[in-house]
Image (spheres, rainbow, N blue to C red):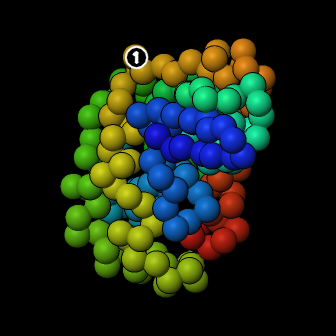
Amino acid sequence: MILLACGEFKSKVLLGKNQAPRSRSATTTPVRSRSVTTTLVRSRTVSNDLPGYDSDLIAEQQIWAAVDPNARNEAFNCTNGDVFQWKHLRKVLAEQFEIENYGLEDGKCSERVRLEEIMKGKESVWEEIVRENQLQPTKLNEVAVWSYADTVMNIGAGYLVSMNKSKEHGFLGFRNSISSFVTWIGRLKSHKIVP
């Protein structure tokens, strides 16, 4: 939970189970972790049997909750506002990272994965990818919080967060999850974090 204070009142924006404090990077951890994982899939060092919210939206809602009197002393969920499953992201990742066969058949991927385990021993592969693509010099453990990514991606299809209370109090922000991922992947590429 993040507590915001402004003037004489306080508002809370509750970040759902899928939310983590922002890391050093300006992008969301799920986007970074999936982008880096997909890069390793493309390099053929990680198999593709793998199954977020937009940080701009979180910031937008936090600012609203801090300054709008309608949000006074209230707690709110924060989510993109659409129904999203990780399997819907597979085609987007394949397109964004130019991978022809990215296991797009439904039901062919594991429901539970542990990226923290999968990424062990891949440091040298990441270093080579960084060098070959002239990316920003980063270590594999710096580009994503793998344990958090595991939590986010293993929540399952039955987890939904309602934004109704936020809407009732005047916050109407939302993001299309697929479009958001494309935007953030583009930002990662433009900042030379992923190829």
Decide if residue 167 is on the left or right side of residue 153. right
Residue 11 visible in image: yes
Please tell me in which quadrant of the rendered image residue 117 appears.
bottom left
The one of 195 and 5 positioned closer to us in this rendering: 5
Whole-percent x, y for residue 119 in the image:
29, 61
State the SS at label 1: loop
Question: Image point 34% across, 55% down: which residue?
Answer: 146
Q: In the image, what residue type sits under mark 1?
A: Gly
The image quarter containing residue 135 is: bottom right
Place of residue 193 in the rendered image (x, y in percent of width and height, measured from the top left): 57, 70
Residue 35 x, y percent position in the rendering: 51, 55
Mark 1 lies on residue: 158
Characterize the local packing of mark 1: few (<14), some (14-19) or many (20 or more) Cα atoms within 10 angstroms. Answer: few
- Residue found at x 22% / y 69%: 121
Vertically, is 135 above or below 16? below
Q: Is residue 189 above or below residue 157?
A: below
- What's the residue at 47%, 52% (across, down)? 21
Quadrant of the rendering where the C terminus is positioned: bottom right
Residue 162 x %, y %: 56, 18
Q: Is residue 167 left or right of residue 141?
A: right
Does 56 sit left or right of 193 as displayed? Answer: right
